[in-house]
Amino acid sequence: MSDEKQDFDIIPQYDSIDQIERDLGFFPAKEQSCKTLTTEQVKHYNENGYVSNLEIFSKREADDLREYFDALLEEAIEAGGDSYSISTAHFKHAKVYDLLKHSTIVNYVKDILGENVVGWGSHFFCKMPHDGKAVSWHQDASYWPLTPSKTATVWLAIDDADTENACMRFIPQSHLHGHIEWRESRAHENNVLNQTVDNALDFGAPPVDNELKAGQMSIHNDLLLHGSAANGSDRRRCGLTLRYCAADVHAYMDWNLKGVVVAGEADPRLWPGATRP
């Protein structure tokens, strides 16, 4: 017991992500071990950094989920927030916690990350019609105090997402370049986030639109360059991002307190486990 306590105490504490020595390289999924995705889908993920159009919910279930989000959005706006304010939602809302652990979603993710998986993030990205907000080309790994980068994001479509209402876009194969230099976004970019990768198109194949029907999802690697244009349509475009990592990932700056073991097991010294709200 004393040895275990000592091991926990020597895990370093950091005040800034810049202080953390991170292993930001691509860790391929094991194509021969997939059980829910096809071998071709896992191969596509390894080669291109994403897999898409995975079926999760029926139309009726997707409609129910949209109604649920509508109520959350109304609450957020009444509280002084906006359509991007509902983050770390599994800490606050039991239904989102359950979505993070949803067996079909988790089974897809296990084919990417392995048998032992932690879910640690949940954030609604909702572009209202004509809101003027874009998402500049970026890598998720740049934002996260996690190492190694055995992490992936599920993008679950709450609304239909297509080119017209500014669906997410990927630069295939860009995840194979490791961590890419970025700069602070400038005001004229109207970026929802705060990082921009210049010359992003030099790092992969031509961009692809990640078009999804409500109730479908995609999975993308944390090193894949992605972004989206402003929504110039008359339709809303909302998605729920669910973030996952392999259980051997170290999370610093108390981010491990966000984690929920969704498959297999994890060392409780690394991931003590968030409870259902």
Image: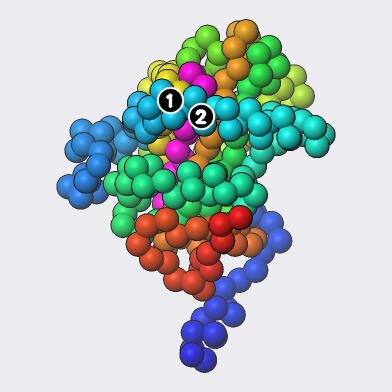
Dot 1: few (<14), some (14–19), or many (≥20) neighbours within 10 Å?
few
Q: Magenta stretch: give its range.
A: 147-161
- Name which residue type carries label 1: Arg
Q: Per the image, is 104 magenta? A: no
Q: Is residue 226 left or right of residue 258?
A: left
Q: Is residue 267 visible?
A: yes
- Relative to residue 223, is residue 130 depicted above or below? above
Seen from the viewer's position, the closer of residues 116 and 69 is 69
Q: Nearer the viewer, residue 78 or 264?
A: 78
Residue 60: assigned label? 1
Residue 235 found in image quarter: top right
- From the viewer's perspective, tell me whether residue 107 is left or right of residue 33: right
Residue for point 38% across, 66% down: 265
Q: Amino acid at mark 2?
A: Asp
Disc 2 target residue: 64
Question: How far apart are the alpha carbons under marks 1 and 2?
Answer: 6 Å
Give the label on residue 16, or none: none
The residue at the point 38 percent across, 27 percent down is 58
Q: Is residue 112 above or below residue 71?
A: below
Count of numbered labels shown in the rendering: 2
User: How far across and down, in percent of the image, does residue 72 sit?
Assistant: 66, 35
- Please state the horizontal and vertical placement of residue 213, each as a whole percent of the image: 42, 20
Pointer 1 and pointer 2: residues touching (CB < 8 Å)?
Answer: yes
Secondary structure of residue under mark 1? helix
* Residue 24 place in picture, x, y as percent: 47, 50
Q: In the image, what residue occupies the spot 66% across and 31% down?
A: 71
Whether residue 216 can be seen here: no
Identify the coloring: rainbow
